[in-house]
Image (tube, helix red, strand yellow):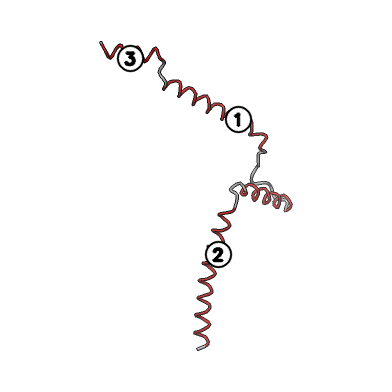
Amino acid sequence: MNADFVEHLADSERHDEGRFWKQRRAYEKKWRDPDDVYLDVEHREEERKKQGLPPRVGIVPHSVVAEDEQRWEAQQEQKKKRASKRRKPTSNAKSAMREKGHD
């Protein structure tokens, strides 16, 4: 009788353990900053360095890529301006279209 009771209790605890692990994981994922991944990689690389192992990943500082990001954003802005200029017909073009329509 005791063995059956303990077995049932163990099954229940394993089920609860899995359920609570999923709840905890969801809670941590909800509040975790997506950029924390980079910090985790940086810490792991420091551990590898202490162990005398070669680095597996290189981390590029933000200052290096900031200029490229600014240039890319400027290009995107120019593309938007060019696209909006193409879509807007000028007043001369509007009057020319009206004249063609009346012929």
Q: Which of marks 2 and 3 is in front?
A: 3
Q: What residue type is labelled 1?
A: Gln
Q: Give percent across and percent down for residue 30.
A: 55, 54
Q: Nearer the viewer, residue 45 or 71?
A: 71
- Residue at disc 3, secondary structure: helix
Q: Which residue is label 1 attached to?
A: 70
Q: Earlier in the sequence, mark 2 or mark 3?
A: 2
Q: Which of marks 1 and 3 is nearer the N terminus?
A: 1
Left or right: where 36 falls relative to 9: right
Disc number placed over residue 97 in the picture, else none: 3
Q: Which amino acid does label 3 sit on?
A: Met
Instruction: Please tell me which residue is depicted at 39% across the width and 12% down the height of the picture.
Output: 92
For mark 3, does the 10 Å Cα neighbourhood hold few (<14), some (14 to 19), or many (20 or more) residues?
few
Q: Give percent across and percent down for residue 14.
A: 53, 72
**Separation of residues labelled 1 and 3 (CA atoms):** 40 Å
Asked whether the beta carbons under mark 2 and mark 1 sit within 8 Å of each other, the answer is no
Instruction: Please tell me which residue is depicted at 55% across the width and 64% down the height of the picture.
Output: 21
Q: Earlier in the sequence, mark 2 or mark 1?
A: 2
- Residue 25: image quadrant is bottom right
Q: What residue type is labelled 2?
A: Trp
Q: Give percent across and percent down for residue 48.
A: 69, 51
Q: Which residue is label 2 attached to?
A: 21
For mark 1, does the 10 Å Cα neighbourhood hold few (<14), some (14 to 19), or many (20 or more) residues?
few
